[in-house]
Structures are given as structure tokens and as C-alpha cells.
Image (cartoon, rainbow, N blue to C red):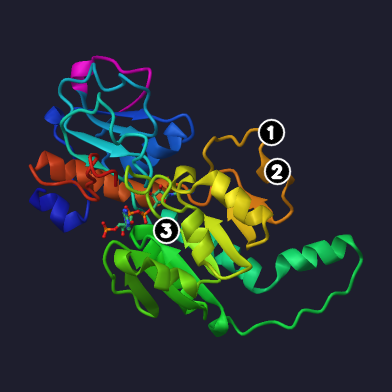
Amino acid sequence: MNQTNVLSGAKPALDARSGALLFYSEFDDPQEWEEALKAELPDLDFRVYPEVGDPADIRYVLAWKPFPGFFAPFANLELVVNLGAGIDSLAGRADLPDVPIARLSDPGMVTLMRSYVLFSVIRYARDIPAFEEAKRLRQWRYIHPRPLHRIKVGVMGLGHLGAAAAAALAEAGFDVSGWDHAPKEIAGVRCYSNSERDSFLSEVEVLVNMLPLTAETRGLIDESVFAALPQDAKFVNASRGPVVDEPALIEALQSGHLGGATLDVFWTEPLPADHPFWEMDNVLITPHLASITVPETAARDVAESIRRVGAGREPLHLVNPRRGY
Ligand code: NDP
């Protein structure tokens, strides 16, 4: 950064050798991203796939679920930013370039995820499904509300989003516990580690899954997890479908052991028309939108990562594709 920039507060410009950023996503609006990134890096050469130009110019890729072979033409790549939090679509790919891979973790994404988890848990805590049913039957059905501090909510996976969701639940007044590899420090949340799984589960009335999808977590929420929950517990899945053993979840819901589920993610998306979840009154389905990346807030981190990599430093939110998160 030169002296003028420091004094004027202007954003540091990229130099002419900084190369271009290539954007790829079937879900996100490139124009919104271009505007947000150019507010941070006015000189950024922003290109949108398939308008790549000379592949040798591409130094940075900002992409969501790029197709196999996507990276092959870009010999001068210095950074890949996954346009989202979960990197499961990149992890384990044979065609990943040997450059730092970063994820996004922007305040907008955290706020949206917090709101989804709060909504899902409060919906159960305040008996809303029962009132929706009563309305359909024209019944005035009084259910005495339970104080929130007596309702036990458990969050599995206490990373960027999981920890924020657990903290928000605690702040809202619930009795919150969390489970992760190792105990984490989160205000108002009792934290358990891997080896304490069954003690954690035995007291959870609403279980929220916030684990990333990795080789280790695939199918981790299985029959034994549902069996360890108390009768009539509820389940919320806001991370990835394959972390859950779907047939075991269906069985637990059909047997009545689980009282309900709120599901944003599934083994197959879009959820096939003949999937049993569509028929189940105690399942709320949302189409994988618990949270999204918000360009205005995420662009700051992407720009900072580009500056850092240009200066030979690590990007923000570096991930380990071999570990899977
Ligand atoms: P992070 O990568 O920040 O955190 C993951 C957490 O899970 C870490 O605390 C990690 O522990 C823990 N963990 C990983 N593997 C295990 C395991 N085998 N056993 C116990 N704990 C484990 O993820 P985020 O919180 O940011 O996001 C979670 C997931 O949410 C994302 O991976 C993504 O799939 C999903 N997501 C879903 C969205 C939606 O719209 N439905 C939107 C955005 C994200 P440690 O750090 O100790 O290793």
C-alpha cells in the first residue's frame, strides 16, 4: 500500500502482474460478485466462465462446484476460493491444483445460518407444527408452553457456523450443549468431545447437525445416534445430507421414536418426487438454502485473501481438502 492510499483510506490496487480472477457458479450472480469485489479491488480483472480469455492470465478462481477437469487449463493459478462454506465438492478430487484452497465464512452467511437454526428449533419449542395441524382441523388447541431454559438442544459440529448457531440458541434462552472432535469454549454452551457422544445425546430434545461432510462424517448420524436420543426428540439437518443415514432417519421417524425433522439437505438434491420424506407430516423440507454466501460481506475476505496470496502469505479461511473441511 502506498502512502497516498494510507492517507486517503483508498483500497490498495492490484498491480498489473496480478492476473485475472475467474468466476464459476451455476447458482450465484456474477454481476453482484463483480461489483462487490471491484469495490475492494478496483483494478481486478474479473472474468466469468466460459469467457476465460487466455488461460495463462488466470491466477485466482472463485468457484462453486466446478466440473471435473475445470482447473486443468490454468497453469498460473495461485489461489482457489470455494464459493461457500462446505468444500465437500472439492475434497478428494483428483484434478485439484496444488495451490491454497480457501472457503468463505462471511458474516452474512453466519447470520443466515443462525436464523435457520433458531427458526427450526423455536418452531418445535413453541409447538408450531401442532398449531398448524390444529388450524387445518379448526381446533383451538391449547398447549402449555415450556420455558425455553428447560428445553435441551444439542449441536453436532461447532465450527464457524455450528458455534454461531449454538451461541445464538444459548442467547435465545435454550439449554444448549455441543459436540465436536474436542471440547470448544462457547459462552453458555456445555461442550462434549467425541468420546462423550452418548452422554451428550441422551439429554438432547432437539438435535442440530452442523458437521461438514468428510470421509469420517459420512453416515455418522446413524441408527445408534437416533436410538440414543430421548423418545420424541426432533432433528434438524442444516449441513449436508450424506452426514445422515437417511434410511435410519426414515425408520426413526416412522417408528415414532423421533417426533419430527427439519431437513434442508438430502442424499439426492433436488429431493426425488417419490421420496418418502414428501409423504411424512412430521418432516419439514427446505430446498438447501439454510444459508448462502452474501457477496457484499464475503467479498472483503476474498479480496484480502488475494492480497495475502500476492504477498506470499496464507489466504483467510484456508481449508485442507484431504481432511475435507
Ligand atoms: P467448519 O469447517 O468451520 O467446522 C466443522 C466443525 O466440525 C469443526 O468444529 C470440526 O472440528 C468438526 N468436525 C469435523 N469432523 C468431525 C468429526 N469427525 N467428529 C466431530 N467433529 C468434527 O464448518 P462450518 O461450521 O462453517 O459449516 C458446517 C457445514 O455446514 C459446512 O461444511 C457445510 O457443509 C454446511 N453448510 C450448509 C449450508 C446450507 O445451506 N445447508 C450453508 C453453509 C454451510 P475441529 O475443528 O475440532 O476439527
Q: Of the residues shown, which amino acid type is indicated by label 1? A: Ala
Instruction: Name the residue nearer the viewer: 219 or 154.
Output: 219
- N-term-proximal mark, 3 vs 2: 3
Residue corresponding to mark 3: 110
Vertical position of residue 228 compared to residue 150: above or below: above
Q: CA distance from mark 1 to mark 3?
A: 31 Å
Residue 20 place in picture, x, y as percent? 24, 27
Query: Quick one: SS at disc 3?
Result: helix
Residue 83 relative to residue 313: left or right: right
Within-10-Å neighbours for mark 1: few <14, some 14–19, many 20+: few
Query: Can I make out residue 5 in this image?
Result: yes
Q: Nearer the viewer, residue 210 or 28?
A: 210
Look at the image and say whether residue 56 sits in the magenta stretch. yes
Of the residues tagged 3 and 2, which is closer to the observer? 2
Q: Residue at x 67, y 57 (%)?
A: 255
What residue does disc 2 label?
Answer: 278
Q: Residue furthest right?
A: 138
Q: Nearer the viewer, residue 300 or 154?
A: 154
Q: Residues within 10 Å of mark 3 (few under 14, many from 20)?
A: many
Could you tell me how far apart the alpha carbons at marks 3 and 2 are, in whole angstroms? 28 Å
Point out residue 301 in the picture as x, y percentages from the top left corner: 28, 49
Which stretch is magenta? 46-57
How far is disc 1 from disc 2 in space, using C-alphas? Answer: 8 Å
Check residue 273 in the rendering and tell me which mark sits there, or answer none: 1
Question: Which picture quadrant has residue 135?
Answer: bottom right
Q: Are marks 1 and 3 in contact (CB under 8 Å)?
A: no
Residue 264 in view (yes/no): no
| Residue type marked 3 | Val
